[in-house]
Amino acid sequence: MFFRTKSEKATDKAVSRATEAKESAVEAGTQATDSIRAAAVSVLNSVSEAVAPKAEHASEVVKERTAKAREAAADRAAEAREEAADRTSHFRSAATERATSARDRAVSNPDKGIDSAVPRAQERIGAAGKSIDSAVDSARDTLIDDLLPRLQEMLGNVQSGKDDILARTDGPIATVTGAPKAKKRRAARC
């Protein structure tokens, strides 16, 4: 038979103890891992239970504040809308007044210009006839007797034409100034 020495027996014993220690360490590690997992699950459940009501409360607070902010924004938008409508109304009335005064000036300025220019032009033409030299007598006769009266007549026609145009109720000036239009007669019913 085979005899073993003390050192071999000690080595076998050490290997056996090392194997036992290894198995014991693996079992202790497994137990530690399991207990850590259980503790983590417990902590996670505790945190979830503690945080869930706070999260629900935070959600409700956010909803309330959002609703308040929405209402405040709607109120501000309504105020801004009313202010814009007031400003628009003010600008509209100012523009209407300016358009009315511009229309009145557009009609009255040519009227005044013609009324003041025609008599002056007629006077000057009449005075020109008196100051023409006698050396050009035949030309003078033609001018004084024929041309100048025609010019005076034409200027008079311009003024009377202007007055006729302004007096029309269906003409272009009446359209601009808003003069009343003649009413149409109704046909008699039988």
Image: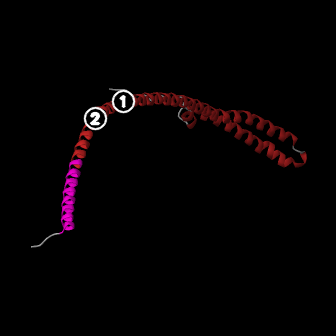
Main secondary structure of the magenta stretch: helix
Residue found 80% across the figure and 40% down from its top? 125
Residue 93 position in % (x across, y down): 54, 29
What colour scheme does the image use? secondary structure
Q: Which residues are magenta?
A: 5-32
Label 1 CA crowd tier, 10 Å (few <14, some 14–19, many 20+): few
Real-space Cα distance between discs 2 and 1?
Answer: 23 Å
**Local SS, label 2:** helix
Q: Going from the N terminus, do you reach mark 2 or mark 1 first? A: 2
Is 16 within the magenta?
Answer: yes
Q: Viewer-proximal residue, 70 or 74?
A: 70
97 displayed left or right of 141? left
Q: Viewer-proximal residue, 4 or 175?
A: 4
**Badge number at residue 52:** 2
Which residue matches tag 1?
A: 67
**Badge number at residue 26:** none
Where on the picture, by quarter, is residue 75? top left
Camera sees residue 181: no
Camera sees residue 162: yes
**Local SS, label 1:** helix
Q: Is residue 21 above or below residue 157?
A: below
Q: Viewer-proximal residue, 58 or 160?
A: 58
Residue 133 position in % (x across, y down): 89, 45
Q: Amino acid at mark 2?
A: Ala
184 displayed left or right of 42? right
Q: Viewer-proximal residue, 73 or 82?
A: 73
